[in-house]
Amino acid sequence: MQLEHFHHSPAFAIIAPCLQEEPPYLLSHAKKPVLIMRNKTTKKPTKKPLQNMENEKQDNEETIAKYGELVLSLPKERGWMTQHLVQYQGFWLSPACAFKGAPLLHQHFHARPSDIFLATFQKSGTTWLRALMFATMNRALHDVSSDQYPLLTTGPHDCFPFLDAYIHQTDSISHLNSRPILSHDASPELFSTHMPYALLPKSVTASSSGCRFVYVCRNPKDVLVSKWIFMNKMRPKQLAPLSLQEAYDLFCQGVSHYGPFWDHVLGYWKASLEFRDKIFFLKYEDLKKDPFVHLKRFAEFLGQPFSLEEERKGVVQEIIKLCSFENLSHLEVNKTKVQWFSSQLVVKNSFFRKGQVGDWKNYFTDEMARRLDQITDDKFNASGLTFGPAAE
């Protein structure tokens, strides 16, 4: 079955100037999230001096003004959830969000050696991996079997910061070094990002930085379908929905948020081959097929291996069950909660759709599948990266 258009869901609301060039929608009942500043010595909540915040604000505004001029000269194409995307250093970014955020990250985000990043291309299993990482890294603080476990009442996107959402703050860039109150006692600190590896600051990617990444990739056919459906929900009502064929053509040309898809994946793939102790590269399909094996592998990579006693007690299985699509998608918090990514990016909608491998078969024609497979084979040629039968 091929759907020609996907219409806006009435259950979806958003306030986000980074998603459009028009005034944002409003959620009158939404409240600003509580954040705690990172204190690099004591790790206790701390307040920034007013003068420092004013200086950051001015520096932020100067950076934004500079890139506001640059954006006018960049190549432009049709956007998926915005009117346009601009091409910056080979990648397609939303002009008022990711494009503005890349230089702010370079200037203002100072990574610590213990920081850990979950990196993904959009719609590649980010929400699921967020839950798995949080539960794995915080199991000494929270009993996974408890009926008071944080993930039962707090969505995965509130467990640790989505870095890209903090970069378009206009009041103070200090949000870049903030984290939700939920996990302020946890060490190391966790962040999530969709940014291409090449656009991340050297404080994060340098081999000497000490930072580690878990990167999850997914078959591009499933990515495309999931992204098309999700982006049409986020697309402002004054912009006509994208048809599947329109989204497909743009994707094949490499034009999508944070795309091209293949360049995004290859950036992290090549880095993982060069820095094996820094980047753990994982396929969504492999994790779906055998979550027990791969959860143990990335827990060990993150420096939190499961002990024999934990395995005997079934802790690994409990985490897998807790973070499963079936469990998380049916929790009330993940069906109804207004999701704050920042004071300017708020989404009211579940991030869970199907989580299936091969759902593209319900949308693609044989020719669409053949063409996209050929592009993927050509792009990944000689890289050593393939999508096998498990991804079909």
Image (spheres, helix red, strand yellow):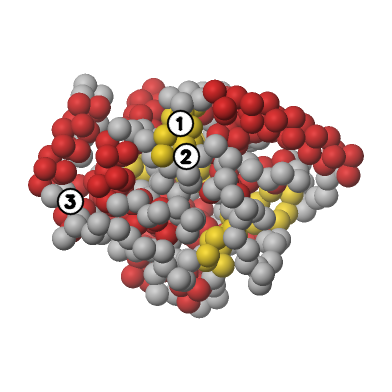
Q: Eyeballing the image, is 16 above or below 204?
A: below
| Quadrant including the N terminus | bottom left
Mark linked to residue 371: none
Question: Residue sitting at 33 percent across and 33 percent down?
Answer: 254
Give the left or right position of residue 370, taking residue 329 as reference. left
- CB under 8 Å between discs 2 and 1: yes
Q: Which of 76 and 184 is in front in this view?
A: 76
Give the total number of marks visible in the rendering. Answer: 3
Task: List the residue tagged with mark 1.
Answer: 76
Distance between mark 2 and mark 1 Cα atoms? 6 Å
Residue identifier under label 3: 364
Residue 344 shown left or right of residue 312 in the figure: right
In the rendering, at what x and y percent does residue 296 appear?
Answer: 36, 50
Mark 3: few, some, or many residues within 10 Å (few <14, many ≥20)?
many
Viewer-nearest residue: 260 or 108: 260
Picture coordinates of residue 78, whole percent (x, y): 41, 39
Please, what secondary structure does the residue beneath circle 3 have? loop
Taking the image as shown, residue 293 lies to the left or right of residue 369, namely right
Q: Is residue 248 above or below residue 8?
A: above
Tag 2 residue:
84
Could you give the CA–CA distance between mark 3 and mark 1, rounded to whole angstroms? 27 Å
Q: Is residue 284 visible?
A: no
Q: Which residue is drawn at 66% across and 72% down?
A: 29
User: In which quadrant of the rendered view does residue 72 lie?
Assistant: top right
Q: What residue type is labelled 1?
A: Lys
- Identified at 57% across, 28% down, the residue is 71
